[in-house]
Image: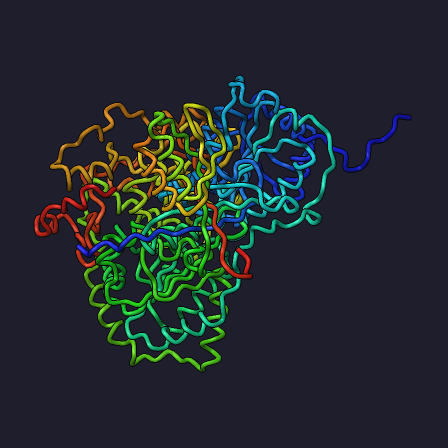
Amino acid sequence: MATPEATEKHTMAVLVDNEPGVLARVIGLFSGRGYNIESLTVAETDPKNKLSRITIVTSGTPMIIEQIKAQLNRIVPVHGVHDLSEEGPFVERELALIKVTGGVESRAETLRLADIFHARVVDTTPESYVFEMTGSTDKLDAFINLMEPLGVVDISRTGVAAISRGAGKF
Amino acid sequence: MAVQPAVHELSGAEMVIRALVDQGVDVVFGYPGGAVLPIYDALFKQNRLRHILVRHEQGAVHAAEGYARSSGKVGVVLVTSGPGATNAVTGLTDALMDSVPLVCLTGQVPTHLIGNDAFQEADTTGITRPCTKHNYLVKDVNDLARVMHEAFMIARTGRPGPVVVDLPKDVLFATGLYVPPETTPTRKSYRPQVKPETARITAAAQLIMAAKKPLFYGGGGLINSGPRACALFTEFAHLTGFPVTLTLMGLGAFPASDKQYLGLVGMHGTFESNNAMHDCDLMINIGARFDDRVTGKVAAFAPHSRKIHVDIDPSSINKNVRVDLAVVGDCAEVLAALIAELKARKYAADPARITPWWHQIETWRKRDCLRYAKSGTIIKPQYAIERLYALTRDRDVFVTTEVGQHQMWAAQLFKFDQPFHWMTSGGLGTMGYGLPAAIGVQLAHPDALVVDIAGEASILMNIQEMSTVCQYRLPVKVFILNNQYMGMVRQWQELMHGGRYSESYTAALPDFVKLAEAFGAVGLRAEKPGDLDRVIQEMIAVDRPVIVDVQVDPKENCFPMIPSGAAHNEMLLGPEDKQASGPVSEEGMVLV
């Protein structure tokens, strides 16, 4: 047996026509062919031309990653696939809303940790906080792990949005 | 006097007809139902389109496939909502796997009922998304003409495939503006690469000029590209003097009678083709996709070769097998560029360079791998195909098949010298394909001899289409190799499952002669080898549909064979080979 090729994590930007069913085509491709989706976000980014941008974080062997890009490009309403991980440096951000309900004794500690991580309080009651936090997936994970013992009750995350550094497109 | 409506103000249903006519369609295969009644009404009022009423929607799709593959045109299907659409799904998947250009129009419940679980409602675009190249749900009659034209463009260009257009009933009744094909804007996101990159042509030429053990591996892409691609492929093969092997979908792309032709490649391919594939130092894949039926065990596939892969679909490249040089483009364009490049380099076939390779190939050929034990008392299925070929070879004969042993014997033994004459279900392997496909072929070629080489199990899967055949007096010939078993299932059970023939024997077969007569066709039977020629000649002579029940040896297996999980140089050549090779590996057992 040959040793299996190592898997790599890739962040891709997929530019699509904003039309009914386009997201289903993309997601159906991943489930139908057994590819991974670690995160997926979508929104219209060019209303004039009715284009949406889908950011997908996926993982696979180099051969699978190449297939994913070729298969995405084959979908008729897909205008282009940009493998940000391959095309050069890029920034990626994710937003999370984290609801924490600690006892009275931990409220100060909760706020102190949030401050270290630059998380913003967007809602507060005597029993709870909702923090808003933006950052890399790793940073969000770290914050959530720290908050966990202090009484996290709910988390809502957007998934990753990404864009290349510099003046180039995508 | 009443005010005349604007010239292009048409109902949705009229627009559908108009768009089909403007796209050059002459035949539509369909079945009516509630949601498509407006289209059937519009069909009734015109005489430019011919509608062929099938007996099951799956049959409509296969008929359109047969029509498309034998003519190079787009096949058109018209079915109703709900069950009409779901019955079409097998055919659509078949067309997607084999890259057959189709446009399938499906009825849909009116837009205001979509999502209400209305009568005969199905989420057709949802169901057909993974089995079409693209699909549409038309919610506004003013989009209808554009969508129709775009559907045809997408079905026929790039790597061809099936496109579904789902038509809610209220849209068919609404009126709107019709736009002709020439004023329909092209879709920005859809631009298949047709012309190859020059640098890749140069690189390919260098590899070709240096090869000592080269092999052409041609596939269905040549057929889809068209007669020009097949002619250029033949010219290129002659220019280089290299051996040629073809996939199941590529048969006819290179003349089978040519001395450079080694035969079918893959699981039931010839000994010479598969050994050449294994030992070659340069594989030139033109329009094939390294299907698992061709590659066998990927880790042991052509281990010492460099590989050039020409394909119009970039997703076919490096999918199953890593290649050294990918050339994305239409086969005809790539071949024309390659020929020009070799001529510019003053290339002349260098016999000294490849003669030892040809000597090696000749030793493989001498094994005569398609040989079988002849019998004077029982009809060997191979013999039946050989006689069918011998007695029809002087005619313009088109062959369709069902799926199984008979299909492989036909692929091995029936020789095709031209493209478009061989229609089979390769990728999906759909039993029941051949008879409806033959209907489509016969409509595209009314004067030709069209034979469905069938098995008795497959033919029963769409036997209802005999009723269609008889309604339109299509002189289709159904040539059944009747071994009373699902032969390929039985063969695998014998070779891999200890001879436990679980459910592969059909205990209550119909009398096919009487069945033919019940439909209004002619029924013939051959029971002994001596009957065959007479029966085949009678089948050809009768200008009516015929079912021939050829009672063949039920125990015959299809050889040569690469057992699943094995490499190309580990072929079984015949029954005497079985013990020698040992049992199939565990890894191979789980493969299909």
The colour scheme used here is rainbow
Along the line of sight, the residue nearer the viewer: B171 or B435: B171
| Identity of the residue drawn at 67% across and 43% down | B22
How many marks are shown on the rendered structure? 0
Residue B533: image x %, image y %?
Answer: 32, 44
Residue A148: quadrant of the picture = top left
Residue B362: image x %, image y %?
Answer: 23, 68
| Identity of the residue drawn at 58% across and 20% down | B113
Residue B537: image x %, image y %?
Answer: 38, 43
A157 in relation to B373, above or below: above
Query: Most extreme residue toward the right, as rendered?
Result: B1
Along the line of sight, the residue nearer the viewer: B352 or A21: A21
Residue B373: image x %, image y %?
Answer: 17, 49
Quarter in which the C terminus of chain B is drawn: top left
Task: Work out whether residue B475 can be spotted.
Answer: no
Task: Work out whether residue B113 can be spotted.
Answer: yes
Specify whether B294 is left or right of B171: left
Query: Most extreme residue toward the top, as rendered?
Result: B119
Quarter in which the N terminus of chain B is drawn: top right
B243 in relation to B369, above or below: below
| Identity of the residue drawn at 43% across and 33% down | A156
Specify whether B405 is left or right of A100: left
Specify whether B584 is left or right of B316: left
